[in-house]
């Protein structure tokens, strides 16, 4: 017997309608190339979104078509998020920092019909345009006064495109399982793979994000959205903020600029911010050097890569800001786990609290987790056993776009293998110990490269560190530490290795350390371990 409730579909357009009606005066502020202080209200934003929807219609773009964006975080990108998905078109966000060949591959694989491009990304598009197979036009996200010169055919100015359109538009109703957005993961090997979100998954994910023990967004918040909108739907913040009427602040192309971030925080009275660890290192260093404070901020969400303990302590001790670390991935929309203190954890000392914050966090309703051994048998949640982290839930990918025929990426019980290795403790706190392919297998036992890296970056003179497994005749593999020092500081090898005494198990201690000027990174800013392994392919341990 079915219940007798309405089956109103969960659609992205309903978020927009709700915010428009309930929070008409909340502001959206952004930095753009043409206006460093662009501000308007939700009401104005959604009126322009309806104009854009009419313009998309006029261009002949139909429901189900893909339209790509190559853009930073700003109000026009926000309008695209809603106008495209709201019309049933797939909003395909592309990371402009990917290798050019990957951008071309992604645009062609998705069969994007139009590209909406930030003026700063135009040189990349100009260089790649010849190789785009189905792109009918490029819309530059600016006004006529700031249009870059271009020899490409059909280059349109965003403001001109929407100028004469009506701001009346009836958002269509359709099945909530309809595709809404598309984002490609950029692994270090193989071609990028597309994760195709649905309206249902996006709306449920936004609900979860607003929960008090998750991102805890409320209408009183002013959210500084530093996490790029091309990275997993900006962690769903453009939707979650609209759900509760939070003010949104977006730094445009100035995401990694400590001065801009600080100025925005002060001027807009930002209460909460989100981004990857590197951004926060940048901001903290700017604050330190210039003696600045960020008094309005109470919490910062950090994810995408392990958050070094130094960030957690600096934020707390110097600025009274609590770091909420979260874990997730493109395939999980991305919300998977998030830092939270539970009542049955008892009274926690400052030290215990920092330790907890440095872990990846607790489960969020909607994501089921398990860790399994090599035989796919579930491992206990005892904080010791570590195994492959698997997840399932309504905002986890069931397959990749246009790879459906290549088989299912899920195991026979429907779990998605995250490629991460983790422990889960009796309180449900998950800790990533490695990527499956990065874990170091020493004499049959696993060593976590992430734990070693975290310990290394706690050294006051270490700027960045990576640990890779290298061949060792006795142990098969042993850890090699690779370090970039801060501002040309010198650290003696012995001193660096002795730093691990008491910080990690004795047998985890790296066998050697190499100092380098810089580490290779992937386009999303993660350390490229594959490139490092190639760089150190011929390396031999001194004791080998
Ligand atoms: P992406 O799909 O590019 O967002 O990458 C997802 C991967 O980033 C995850 O599978 C993890 O390996 C890593 N990751 C994300 N968040 C964290 C975190 N808080 N700590 C450690 N690794 C993380």
Image (spheres, helix red, strand yellow):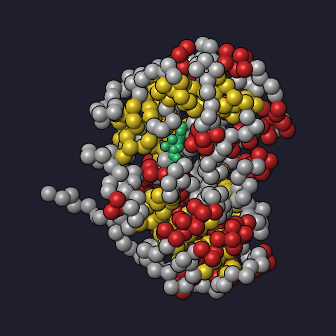
Q: Is residue 168 visible?
A: no
Looking at the image, is 168 positioned above or below residue 243? below
- Asked which quadrant contains residue 93, the reply is bottom right
Q: Position of residue 150 (x, y in %)?
A: 74, 79
* Residue at image location 48% in from the left, 64% down from the top: 181
Work out which residue is located at the far left of the displayed protein and give it. 1
* Residue at image location 63% in from the left, 76% down from the top: 130
Looking at the image, is 492 positioned above or below residue 20? above
* Residue at image location 76% in from the left, 37% down from the top: 517
Q: Position of residue 402 (x, y in %)?
A: 40, 65
Which quarter of the rendered picture does the C terminus lie within?
top right
Looking at the image, is 326 positioned above or below residue 83? above
- Asked which quadrant contains residue 415, the reply is top left
483 horizontally vs 42: left or right: right
189 horizontally vs 518: left or right: left
* Residue at image location 71% in from the left, 16% down from the top: 494
Q: Nearer the viewer, residue 404 or 227?
A: 404
Q: Position of residue 280 (x, y in %)?
A: 69, 41
Q: Position of residue 149 (x, y in %)?
A: 77, 78
Q: Nearer the viewer, residue 349 or 177?
A: 177
């Amino acid at each position: 017997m079915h219940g007798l409730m309405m089956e109103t579909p969960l659609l992205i357009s309903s978020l927009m309608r709700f915010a428009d009606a309930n929070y008409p005066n909340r502001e959206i502020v952004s930095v753009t190339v043409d206006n460093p202080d662009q501000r308007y209200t939700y009401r104005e934003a959604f009126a322009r979104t309806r104009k854009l929807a009419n313009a998309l219609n006029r261009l002949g773009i139909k429901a189900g078509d893909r339209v790509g964006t190559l853009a930073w975080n700003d109000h026009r990108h926000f309008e695209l998020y809603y106008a495209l998905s709201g019309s049933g078109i797939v909003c395909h966000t592309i990371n402009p920092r990917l290798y050019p060949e990957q951008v071309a591959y992604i645009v062609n694989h998705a069969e994007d019909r139009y590209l909406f491009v930030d003026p700063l990304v135009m040189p990349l598009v100009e260089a790649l345009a010849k190789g785009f197979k189905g792109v009918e036009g490029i819309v530059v996200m600016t006004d006529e006064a700031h249009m870059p010169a271009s020899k490409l055919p059909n280059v349109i100015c965003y403001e001109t495109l929407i100028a004469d359109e009506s701001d009346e538009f009836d958002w269509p109703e359709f099945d909530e399982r309809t595709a809404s957005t598309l984002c490609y993961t950029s692994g270090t090997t193989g071609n990028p793979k597309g994760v195709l979100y649905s309206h249902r998954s996006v709306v449920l994910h936004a609900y979860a994000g607003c929960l008090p023990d998750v991102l805890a967004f409320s209408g009183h918040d002013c959210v500084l959205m530093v996490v790029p909108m091309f990275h997993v739907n900006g962690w769903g913040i453009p939707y979650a903020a609209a759900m509760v009427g939070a003010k949104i602040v977006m730094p445009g192309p100035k995401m990694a600029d400590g001065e801009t971030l600080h100025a925005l925080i002060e001027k807009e009275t930002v209460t909460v911010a989100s981004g990857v660890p590197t951004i926060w290192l940048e901001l903290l260093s700017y604050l330190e050097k210039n003696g600045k404070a960020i008094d309005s901020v109470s919490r910062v969400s950090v994810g995408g890569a392990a958050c070094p303990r130094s960030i957690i302590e600096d934020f707390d001790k110097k600025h009274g800001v609590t770091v909420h670390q979260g874990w997730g991935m493109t395939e999980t929309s991305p919300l998977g786990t998030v830092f939270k203190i539970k009542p049955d954890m008892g009274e926690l000392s400052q030290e215990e609290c920092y330790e907890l914050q440095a872990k990846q966090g607790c489960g969020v309703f909607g994501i089921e987790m398990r860790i399994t051994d090599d035989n796919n048998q579930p491992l206990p949640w005892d904080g010791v056993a570590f195994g492959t982290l698997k997840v399932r839930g309504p905002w986890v990918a069931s397959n990749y776009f246009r790879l459906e025929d290549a088989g299912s990426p899920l195991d026979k019980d429907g779990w998605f293998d995250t490629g991460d290795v983790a422990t889960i403790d009796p309180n449900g706190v998950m800790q990533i110990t490695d990527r499956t392919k990065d874990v170091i297998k020493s004499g049959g036992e696993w060593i976590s490269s992430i734990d070693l890296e975290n310990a290394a970056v706690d050294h006051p003179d270490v700027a960045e560190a990576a640990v890779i497994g290298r061949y060792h005749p006795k142990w098969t593999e042993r850890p090699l530490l690779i370090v970039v020092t801060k501002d040309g500081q010198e650290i003696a090898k012995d001193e660096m290795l002795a730093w691990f005494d008491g910080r990690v198990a004795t047998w985890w201690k790296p066998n050697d350390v190499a100092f380098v000027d810089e580490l290779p990174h992937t386009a999303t800013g993660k350390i490229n371990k594959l490139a490092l392994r190639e760089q150190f392919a011929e390396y031999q341990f001194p004791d080998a």
